Image (cartoon, helix red, strand yellow):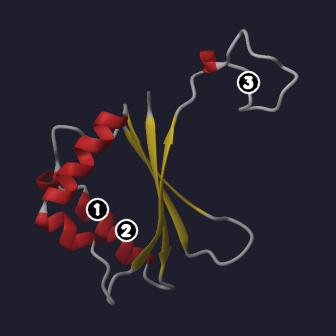
């Protein structure tokens, strides 16, 4: 079942090019592992409010792949140095969230439609 890791960053004003350079360095082949993300997408808030928030969505085929990649990153000293918080970092990591896909056939055909979502009789 697909897993999406959502990383929310606050990028310091004027430092977006530095953040993009850092992400380009993270794509260097020296950081390749046996398990790599299926896709990576980046978004920023459009309206309302400040435009310095960035959301990075990284998709893995399943939780095992996410775990293997995370273990690789945690074991790699150069990766940890690149992303450790520092006063000079162009970004601040605000939050990390993991989402797992709910397949279309996940609905319980025997469940009652008269109760709120998530409260199905056993």
From the viewer's side, name the closer residue of 83 and 111.
Answer: 111
Residue 120: mark: 3
Residue at 28% x, 70% y is 83
Residue at 56% over, 76% down: 52
The answer to whether marks 2 and 3 mark residues whose Cβ atoms lie closer than 8 Å is no
Along the line of sight, the residue nearer the viewer: 108 or 12: 108
x then y, percent, for residue 72 = 18, 50
Residue 68 drawn at (x, y percent): 23, 42
Mark 2, mark 3: which one is toward the viewer?
A: 3
Mark 1 and mark 3 lie on one chain; the one further toward the N terminus is 1
Circle 1 Cα neighbour tier, 10 Å, few/some/many (<14 / 14–19 / ≥20):
few
Q: x%, y% of residue 57?
A: 47, 50
**Label 2 near label 1: C-beta < 8 Å?**
yes
Secondary element under disc 1, as helix, strand or loop, is helix
Q: Mark number for residue 20? A: 2
Q: Quadrant of the C terminus?
A: top right
* Numbered label attached to residue 24: 1
Please tell me whether mark 2 sits on a helix, a strand or a loop.
helix
Q: What numbered label is drawn on residue 61?
A: none
The CA distance from mark 1 to mark 2 is: 6 Å
Q: Position of residue 99 (x, y in %)?
A: 51, 43
Secondary structure beneath label 3: loop
Q: Residue at x 19, y 64 (%)?
A: 79
In this rendering, is residue 75 above or below 15? Answer: above
Quarter of the image where one finds residue 60: top left
| Residue in the image at 32% along x and 42% along y | 66
64 left or right of 41? left
Up the image or down, 102 lies above or below 14; here it is above
Q: Marks 2 and 3, Cα distance to the nearest angstrom? A: 45 Å
Q: Nearer the viewer, mark 1 or mark 3?
A: 3
**Badge 3 local density, few (<14 within 10 Å), some, or many (20+)?**
few
């Amino acid at each position: 079942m697909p897993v999406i890791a959502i990383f929310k960053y606050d990028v310091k004003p004027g430092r977006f090019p530095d953040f993009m350079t850092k992400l380009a360095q993270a794509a260097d082949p020296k950081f390749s592992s046996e398990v790599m993300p299926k896709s990576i997408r980046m978004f920023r808030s459009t309206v309302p409010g400040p435009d310095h928030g960035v959301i990075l969505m990284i998709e893995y085929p399943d939780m095992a792949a996410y775990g293997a990649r995370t273990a690789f990153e945690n074991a790699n000293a150069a990766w940890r140095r690149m992303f450790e918080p520092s006063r000079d970092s162009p970004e601040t990591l605000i939050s990390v969230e993991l989402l797992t896909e709910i397949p279309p056939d996940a609905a319980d055909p025997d469940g009652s439609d008269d109760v709120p979502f998530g409260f199905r009789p056993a």
